[in-house]
Image (spheres, rainbow, N blue to C red):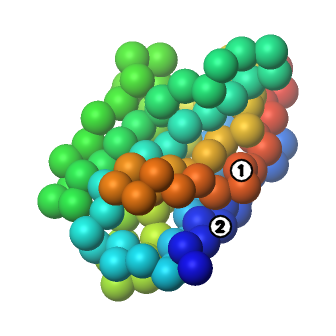
Amino acid sequence: QVQLVESGGGLVQAGGSLRLSCAVSGTTFSFNAMAWFRQAPGKQRELVATISITGNTNYADSVKGRFAISRDNAKNTVYLQMNRVKPEDTAVYYCHDIRNAYWGQGTQVTVSS
């Protein structure tokens, strides 16, 4: 049974930092490209960042230069480092296994102004 469990969300002030984690089990993590998505209230889910099995990364323009996605294959975990956060980053953040199309349950990030 594949499970993706996010953690690290919470309330942060604008300009601050937060690190999200996604622990993956039940699949060969090192073979899976991974992604972070987010969904704000009343909006569609949008792609934030992706990381390939070789570590290549891509970012949405809205987070480029502020967020960093990384992975630790030894820990079966993917991370999203969020720096210089803005109120518009407020959303539920979801971890996504691209290869197997699995989703985590999401973690809430709220940025106060």
Indicate the quadrant containing the C terminus: top left, top right, bottom left or bottom right: top right
Q: Residue type at mark 1: give it.
A: Gly
Judge the density around disc 1: few (<14), some (14-19), many (≥20) Cα neighbours within 10 Å.
many
The percent position of residue 96, horizontal first and vertical second, equals 50, 51
**As displayed, is residue 99 above or below residue 41?**
below
In the picture provided, is 53 more to the left or to the right than 28? Answer: left
Is residue 43 toward the left or the right of residue 25 in the image?
A: right
31 vs 80, nearest the viewer: 31
Q: Nearer the viewer, residue 1 or 93?
A: 1
Q: Residues within 10 Å of mark 2 (few under 14, many from 20)?
A: some
| Above/below status of 26 relative to 65 | below
Q: Which amino acid type corresponds to the residue marked 2 in the rendered image?
A: Val
Could you say whether the residue bearing mark 1 is in a helix, strand or loop? loop
| Mark 1 / mark 2, whichever is N-terminal | 2
Image quarter of the N terminus: bottom right
Along the viewing direction, whichever of 4 and 99 lies nearer the viewer? 99
Q: Quadrant of residue 59?
A: top left
On screen, residue 59 versus residue 38, left or right, reads left
x and y, in percent, of residue 75 in the image? 43, 82
The tally of labels here is: 2
In the image, what residue occupies the spot 45% across and 62% down? 78
Looking at the rendered structure, which numbered label has been put on residue 106? 1
Visible residue check, residue 34: no
Nearer to the camera, 5 or 65: 5
Left or right: 62 with respect to 45?
A: left
Residue 5 is labelled as 2
Please tell me which residue is depicted at 30% across the width and 49% down the height of the picture.
51
Please tell me whether residue 63 is drawn above or below residue 38 in the rendered image: above
Residue 96 visible to the viewer: yes
